[in-house]
Image (cartoon, rainbow, N blue to C red):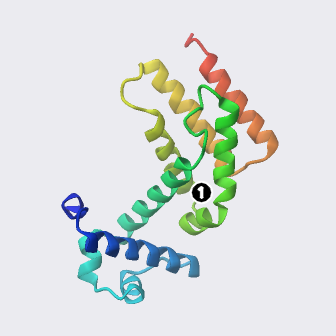
């Protein structure tokens, strides 16, 4: 297992990791084919052992980048944490984040909608589930936030937006009966 925590303070390690990620995204934009370690290392002017000191596999690199980029998109949404206090603003922020990042989303996920949904849902759940919710509230969060992600990732039509807002409000207003 790679001890990345021990290396986070090393500026060379951080810069190399940034180079690997930047190069990977550039290569991924250029081709529909999976990026190979050898191609990445050649383009970044690093050797394979350097790559493997940062990531165990290309899949681990891809997962890390996808998660980091989606978390960044969500972090920049002004109302992303207000799903239960201002549902309309939450949904509008989520839609704007998706629409404003369509080229990056296309690069990250290509045509893998299932994976895209999974990463967005996972990142949203990290923001909303803290481990101290009641079982009933946890279920409401999973249905409301997971449902919002699934409804909006692939379709941001006005009708879908209104439907998502209504769905979240219905879930939150339910008394669990």
- Indicate the quadrant where residue 46 lies: bottom left
Q: Is residue 116 above or below residue 29?
A: above
- Indicate the quadrant where residue 36 lies: bottom left
Can see residue 1? no
Q: Nearer the viewer, residue 88 or 149?
A: 88
Q: Is residue 71 above or below residue 90?
A: below
Q: Quadrant of the N terminus?
A: bottom left
Q: Which residue is mark 1?
A: 113
SS for callout 1:
helix
* Residue that extends furthest to the right in the rendered view of this protein: 159
Direction from residue 47 to residue 132 in the image, left or right: right
Q: Is residue 65 above or below residue 73?
A: below
Residue that appears at 66% across and 30% down: 87
Q: Is residue 80 above or below residue 32?
A: above
Residue that appears at 53% across and 25% down: 140
Residue 104 screen position, x and y as percent: 59, 65
């Amino acid at each position: 297992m790679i001890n990345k925590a021990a290396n986070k303070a090393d500026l060379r390690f951080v810069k190399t990791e940034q180079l690997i990620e930047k190069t990977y995204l550039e290569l991924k934009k250029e081709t529909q084919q999976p990026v190979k370690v050898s191609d990445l290392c050649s383009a970044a002017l690093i050797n394979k052992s350097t790559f493997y000191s940062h990531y165990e596999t290309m899949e681990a690199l891809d997962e890390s980048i996808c998660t980091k980029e989606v978390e960044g998109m969500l972090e920049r949404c002004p109302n992303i944490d207000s799903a239960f206090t201002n549902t309309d603003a939450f949904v509008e922020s989520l839609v704007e984040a998706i629409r404003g990042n369509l080229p990056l989303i296309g690069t990250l996920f290509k045509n893998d909608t299932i994976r895209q949904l999974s990463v967005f849902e996972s990142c949203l759940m990290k923001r909303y589930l803290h481990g101290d919710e009641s079982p009933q509230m946890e279920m409401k969060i999973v249905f409301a936030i997971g449902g919002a992600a699934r409804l909006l990732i692939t379709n941001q039509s006005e009708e879908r937006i209104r439907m998502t807002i209504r769905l979240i409000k219905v879930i939150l207003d339910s008394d669990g009966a």
